[in-house]
Image (cartoon, rainbow, N blue to C red):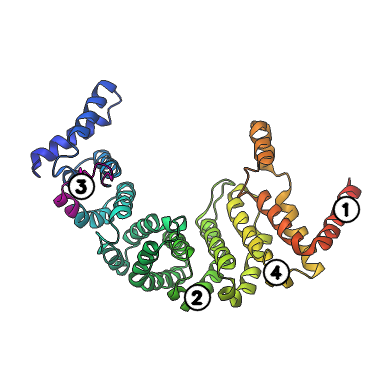
Amino acid sequence: MELNDSNLQSLANYLQQTLSPEISVRKPAEKFLESIEVTQNFPLLLLHLVGKEDLPLNIRLSGAVAFKNFVKRNWGVDSEEGQDRIHSSDREAVKNLIVDLMLRSPESIQRQLSDAVSQIGRHDFPDKWPGLITQMVEKFNSGDFYVINGVLRTAHSLFKRYRHEFKSQKLWTEIKYVLDSFAKPFTDLFVATMNLTTVHANNVELLKVLYSSLTIICKVFYSLNFQDLPEFFEDNMQTWMSNFHTLLNTDIKELRTEEDEEVGPLEMLKSQVCDNVSLYAQKYDEDFQPFLPQMVTDVWNLLVTTGPQPKYDVLVSNALQFLVSVAERPYYSKLFEDPTVLSSICEKVIIPNVEFGTSDEELFGDNPEEYLRRDLQGSDVGTRRRSACDLVRALSNHFEAQMMSVFGNYVQMLQLSK
């Protein structure tokens, strides 16, 4: 299949037909495209079509989706049959083209191609695609956050499997390869982006982009630190934690959403920061120890100043889980042993987050079976109530008598107030 205008036009026509509501038009076009997908140059034709700015966006997007699905179906070689359905020259050409194409494409297309890059990376990175990290890191210096966010989304999609992969020498080797090339420019990008939030403090639209970038950066940080504490991040913990402290205390009213259900960019960012510090408290408590008191204070202030609206649910749940991570460790029990502290936790954090709220009332009215299922089966993991209960359980392991006294007094107060 030649790479020429005639074949590109023909491919565009078939992709247009796959968008037809008429099944008699759509199905034959889908079957035809599937029948030719293993033909040499087919993936390159799709990528060239996706990059043609003179074509309608819906056709280009359809081509990007078709390419992503092609990669999912064919990029991995069947280990039993040992048959490669993609020509070797196509494989190399795709890897040479796709990153730059992804980063200059509209966001809807960029997301599809980012998924495709991640799929290819699962099979080829790093052994068969050693230049991928270099290609991505080079874009950090572009200053274009549309491009940078595309790189970050790809990095997040590529590295998040480190969160659930079994430990192995192959995995350690890959992570070390990534860290050697990626960790420093990634940290530099984080610091530069934090500085830009100060420089452009009065530009609300740009702040939305910058805080979105910081959210993805924090997700990538979580993935890179999940398996073990990398030496680079250990050496630069002060840089990361001081900026996490800043982010947890940042409040920009222009970035708050008006709807009770709509999560804003700052809430998403703070929620991920809570996940990050929870990871360090759980797995690297000895190294994290110098930063822990400040983080406990930051998270405490966050909890007592955050409202009951559903848009804050994930943030509050993650913040509570950080306190759970701390409270579970005997070494940190002295932070909570003061009866005044326990009473304050009960009154200001635990009770408000186990109360029957407006969203609970609405769910009970609209779908009582679902409400009961959540509580009875424990499927509300990750909610405010479940996280608050986890905190009670963690504190009770060390301060059972005090917790019984505190909650007993509170129950008596509630009874007297009726």
In primary-sequence order, the first of circles 1 and 4 is 4
Residue 88 bears which disc, if any? Answer: none
Which amino acid type corresponds to the residue marked 4 in the rendered image? Pro
Circle on res. 330: 4
- Cα–Cα gap, marks 3 and 1: 68 Å
Secondary structure under tag 4 reads helix
Which stretch appears magenta?
A: 77-93
Q: Earlier in the sequence, mark 3 or mark 4?
A: 3
Marks 4 and 1: in contact by CB < 8 Å? Answer: no
Secondary structure mostly seen in the magenta stretch: loop
User: Residue 236: where, in percent of width, then height?
Assistant: 46, 77
Tell me the element at label 2: helix
**x 68%, y 63%: residue:** 328
Relative placement, left or right, of 287 versus 133 is right
Query: Which residue in the protein does label 2 denote?
Result: 237
Q: Nearer the viewer, mark 4 or mark 2?
A: 4
Classify mark 1: residues with Cα within 10 Å, few (<14), some (14-19) or many (20+). Answer: few
Q: Residue furthest top?
A: 24
Residue 157 appears in the picture as rendered: yes
* Residue at mark 3: 47
Q: Answer above or below: position of 334 versus 398.
A: below
* Callout 3–callout 1 Cβ contact below 8 Å: no
Above or below — where is 241 with respect to 110? below
How far apart in space, not on screen, are marks 4 and 2 (Cα)? 23 Å
Q: Residue furthest right?
A: 416
Pointer 3 or 1: first along the chain: 3
- Label 3 to label 4: alpha-carbon separation: 56 Å
